Image (spheres, rainbow, N blue to C red):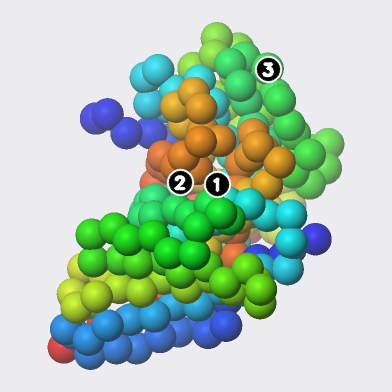
Amino acid sequence: GESVGLHLPTLSVQEGDNSIINCAYSNSASDYFIWYKQESGKGPQFIIDIRSNMDKRQGQRVTVLLNKTVKHLSLQIAATQPGDSAVYFCAEMWGGGADGLTFGKGTHLIIQP
Amino acid sequence: GAGVSQTPSNKVTEKGKYVELRCDPISGHTALYWYRQSLGQGPEFLIYFQGTGAADDSGLPNDRFFAVRPEGSVSTLKIQRTERGDSAVYLCASSLPGFANTGELFFGEGSRLTVL
């Protein structure tokens, strides 16, 4: 069944502030996690990934943190910009991933001017 | 363009009709995926092709749904006897060989299907 989910459906932040989007997973066998961004009317776009042997991974303005003890994943976006407004999905993969990903329901990030 | 192309972008049909949705993946991407996304939900896996063969069709909801990829490139998702519950955005994605190493799927913009 569905094991990936998000804590909040909507997150509103001020432009320039940092955003933190959270995700919980229940499948302890999951060994690979990915964050996707979906803008209105478009398909999801890969942002960043992390493997289960890592706790943290950084990209450009984004950081993903993985806490395997509590099966929790977060995406941090630094200095949010209007272009960051979108729905963010965490997705998990296990067993080689040839069948694709299992997506959570998503968090809608709204940037206030 | 160089991205995944899906047609039509919008399709409105009546209950009971037959529908075909087309996906043209990025050139050189051997893996192709179909997902379905309902309003307010994340994408839900339907079927995965590696080359011409369906490597995993476990996500297809019932036998009204079928997909083909006869030449290992373009894929068509076929829905027979459409029902109102089939209304959703159907997303196609492709990936490079070695997808399991990166997790990066390249998605199209989707085909929005509305069944009246």
- The answer to whether the residues at label 2 and label 1 have Cβ atoms under 8 Å apart is yes
Q: Secondary structure at mark 2?
A: loop
Q: Is residue B48 left or right of residue A82?
A: right
Q: Is residue B83 left or right of residue A79?
A: right
- Going from N to C along the chain, the mark reached first, 2 or 1, is 1
Q: What amino acid is labelled 1 in the image?
A: Tyr
- The answer to whether the residues at label 1 and label 3 have Cβ atoms under 8 Å apart is no
- Going from N to C along the chain, the mark reached first, 2 or 3, is 3
Q: Quadrant of residue A11?
A: bottom left
The answer to whether residue B43 shows anywhere in this view is: no
Q: Quadrant of residue B24?
A: top left
The percent position of residue B62, horizontal first and vertical second, equals 83, 42
Question: Residue B110 shows which numbered tag?
Answer: 2
Q: Chain of mark 2?
A: B
The percent position of residue A90, horizontal first and vertical second, equals 52, 63
The percent position of residue B115, horizontal first and vertical second, equals 63, 54
Is the residue A85 above or below the residue B23 in the image? below
Q: Is residue B108 left or right of residue A91?
A: left
The CA span between labels 1 and 3 is 20 Å
Q: What amino acid is labelled 2 in the image?
A: Gly
Q: Which residue is mark 1?
A: B90
Tell me which residue sits at (39%, 50%) in the image. Answer: A46
Q: Which residue is mark 3?
A: B53
Could you classify mark 3 by the number of other residues whose Cα lies within 10 Å: few (under 14), some (14-19), or many (20 or more)? Answer: some
